Image (tube, helix red, strand yellow):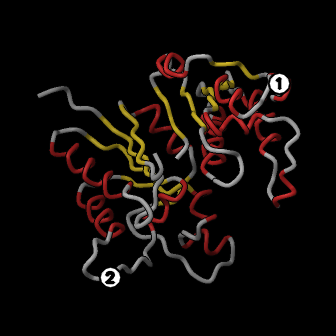
Amino acid sequence: MPQPLSYTLVITGAPWATQAPQTALSFAQALLKAGHRIDRVFLYGDGVHLASALSAPPSDEQHWPRLWSEFLSGNNITAVACIASALRRGIVDKTEQARYELTASNLRAPFEIAGLGEWVEGNLKSNRVLYFHGAH
Amino acid sequence: MTTLIVIDQPPYGSWTGREALDMTFSLAAFDQPAAMLFLGAGVNWLCKGQAADAVGQKSVEKNLAAAALFGVEQILVDSRACAKYGLETSDLLPGTTAAESISETLGQYSRVVFAG
């Protein structure tokens, strides 16, 4: 078997607007199956919509936020939504709800909200950083 | 290891370039070497005298002017795209470097990030 590698996966495409979260999930599952490690999943730009606890697609469709959170929790993988991207798009945790005096919070566990520093750290620590975009 | 951030979207009409710029500044803030390449419609980012307030937006010119200050190593611009958009060197913000061959430029970096 080739040398196992560590990965940071960055998702910038939103679910139901792009295939990015779906492609990234298949890739992530294949990575683990091949014996590689995922250090961190980082949601950026429109990708933060994947961390919404309020998505409610029709029951005969795939529920990408739920599938992703099950995958993350089941494999103990850290997943972070960029705070600047998330706040702009209405994805907030309880801390940000209190800070901005918003009426609700909607961050789906196990996603966390943090800064771009998490992405920078991924660049430093992971052997590979891969991007899942909507438009390219 | 320098990370090359590539912006190929126009400065207005899409938010992805701005978020890619934030990534660049974030690398620089953590003392990680970063460079930028403006490709295709992205070369319009470097145009002098943008009147962004006419479309109710903040000009990206100011953000870019801060790039050198933040420690961004180089701002590369696709020469062919400049010609296509009718931009002469004198139309561009100071401190940009022309890139004649994009494939060669991309090949020089092992970490490349395209704006989403």
Q: Quadrant of residue B86?
A: top right
Q: Chain of mark 1?
A: B
Residue A96: x percent and y percent?
A: 61, 68
Mark 1, residue position: B94
Q: Relative to B74, say whether A48 is above or below.
A: below
Q: Relative to B9, say whether B109 is above or below.
A: above
Which one is in front, B89 or B114?
Answer: B89
Query: Could you tell whether A84 is left or right of B56 in the image?
Result: left
Q: Residue at x 59, y 58 (%)?
A: A85
Q: Amino acid at mark 2?
A: Pro
- Specify the farthest residue to the left: A1
Q: Residue at x 49, y 30 (%)?
A: B112
Q: Amino acid at mark 1?
A: Pro
Q: Quadrant of residue B32?
A: top right
Which one is in front, A104 or B99?
Answer: B99
| Secondary-structure class at tag 2 | loop
Q: Answer whether labels 1 and 2 touch (C-beta < 8 Å).
A: no
- Label 2, residues with CA under 10 Å away: few <14, some 14-19, many ≥20: few
| Secondary-structure class at tag 1 | loop
- Label 1, residues with CA under 10 Å away: few <14, some 14-19, many ≥20: few
Q: Relative to A108, say whether A18 is above or below.
A: above
Q: Chain of mark 2?
A: A
Mark 2, residue position: A58
Q: Residue at x 58, y 71 (%)?
A: A90
Which one is in front, B80 or B8?
Answer: B80
Residue B23: x percent and y percent?
A: 60, 41
Q: How many marks?
A: 2
Instruction: State the separation of the CA atoms marked 1 and 2.
Output: 52 Å
Query: Could you tell whether B104 is left or right of A72 in the image?
Result: right
Q: Relative to B91, say whether A75 is above or below.
A: below
Residue A122: x percent and y percent?
A: 44, 38
